[in-house]
């Protein structure tokens, strides 16, 4: 993760984008961090980019100026703006390596559902943590931070981030591990009792080892350990974070394929966003450049 404590937020003309801007501004003020407001001009689809680029650039600059003005009126934070070009996902994803956090809106309503493709693309392309923010404005009524774990390196990084966040914010931390244990009735005859017991014990160890050491690092942090052996991970996380201030997840789990940018659990959570959700990327390695 970047050592720079700068927070960046990608904006466009949408309700979700405005919610992300406000969330980023609040976070920057609380952390005394500089805020960079970004807008991407995606000119790849233009047949003659030169003829339209000036107009798109002017529109983008006006959008950035207006966003910076609203932040200045509402928060005591040092902000700046920057106009990027190219693919939105690639531009914001690459810019994230310069920041401590990239903040984006969740997507816009489309055909009765939530079109989150862009948010998924940005989270998948990012080399740094990405916060995906919905339109809910009940921040002060929400409490607690939830983190999903499965024993993978990705989830351990998520736990480290979530614990530091909860300790800094004075919030309770819920560490949730959901897995599909054999059902003693439905799977009778397919999974012997001894096997079911072994699986359950192994999963309990995963949860115990995941939180081991957190109390030593954060002695004042209240930690709740939750095991969901008969609940699908996405549903368990969405339900647990329904009233949470923040949900933290690793970009891929222990069953993920390295060629996939995002795991199925993260994909499911972002398409059923229960609260602001931060996606933690894999550890940076030279091979990933």
Image (cartoon, rainbow, N blue to C red):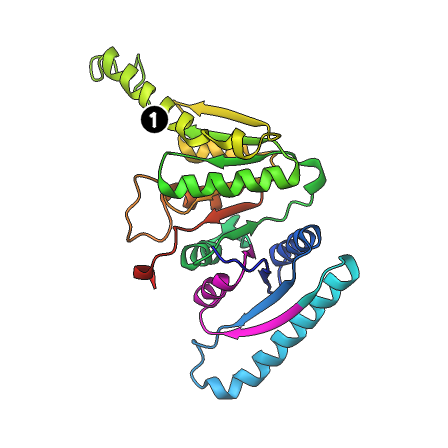
70, 202: nearer the viewer: 202
Residue 93 is covered by the magenta coloring: yes
Q: Which residues are magenta?
A: 80-104
Residue 37 location in percent, x, y? 62, 66
Q: Is residue 219 above or below residue 3?
A: above
Left or right: where does residue 61 sit relative to residue 92?
A: right
Let me know if residue 75 appears in the view: yes
Let me know if residue 138 appears in the view: no
Left or right: where does residue 35 sit relative to residue 118?
A: right
Residue 116 location in percent, x, y? 48, 53
Residue 23 is covered by the magenta coloring: no
Label 1: state its secondary structure. loop
As drawn, the residue found furthest toward the bottom would be: 51
218, 9: nearer the viewer: 218
The quarter holding residue 138 reads top right
Residue at 76% over, 58% down: 76
Residue at 38% over, 56% down: 284
Residue 184 location in percent, x, y? 30, 13
As drawn, the residue found furthest toward the front would be: 216
Q: Is residue 6 above or below residue 231?
A: below
Quadrant occupied by the C terminus: bottom left
1, 35: nearer the viewer: 1
Residue marked by disc 1? 180
Residue at 36% over, 24% down: 205
Q: Is residue 185 above or below residue 14?
A: above
Left or right: where does residue 200 sit relative to residue 130?
A: left
Residue 169 location in percent, x, y? 65, 40
């Amino acid at each position: 993760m970047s050592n720079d404590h700068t927070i960046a937020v990608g904006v466009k003309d949408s309700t979700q984008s405005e919610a992300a801007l406000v969330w980023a501004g609040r976070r920057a003020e609380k952390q005394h961090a500089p805020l960079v407001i970004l807008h991407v001009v995606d000119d790849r689809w233009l047949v003659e980019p030169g003829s339209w680029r000036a107009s798109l650039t002017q529109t983008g600059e006006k959008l950035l100026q207006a966003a910076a003005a609203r932040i200045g009126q509402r928060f005591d934070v040092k902000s700046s703006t920057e106009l990027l070009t190219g693919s939105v996902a690639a531009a914001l994803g690459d810019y994230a390596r310069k920041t401590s956090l990239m903040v984006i809106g969740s997507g816009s309503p489309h055909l009765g559902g939530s079109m989150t493709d862009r948010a998924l693309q940005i989270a998948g392309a990012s080399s740094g943590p990405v916060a995906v923010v919905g339109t809910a404005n009940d921040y002060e009524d929400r409490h607690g931070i939830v983190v999903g774990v499965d024993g993978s390196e990705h989830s351990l990084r998520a736990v480290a981030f979530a614990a530091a966040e909860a300790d800094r914010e004075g919030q309770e931390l819920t560490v949730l591990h959901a897995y599909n244990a054999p059902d003693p009735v439905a799977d009778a005859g397919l999974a012997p009792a001894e096997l079911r017991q072994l699986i359950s014990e192994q999963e309990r160890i995963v949860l115990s080892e995941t939180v081991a050491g957190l109390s030593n690092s954060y002695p004042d942090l209240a930690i709740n350990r939750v095991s969901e052996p008969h609940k699908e991970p996405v549903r368990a996380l969405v339900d647990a974070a329904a009233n949470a201030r923040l949900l933290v997840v690793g970009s891929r789990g222990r069953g993920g394929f390295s060629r996939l940018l995002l795991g199925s659990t993260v994909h499911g959570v972002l398409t059923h966003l229960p609260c602001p959700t931060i996606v933690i990327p894999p550890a940076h390695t030279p091979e990933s450049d």
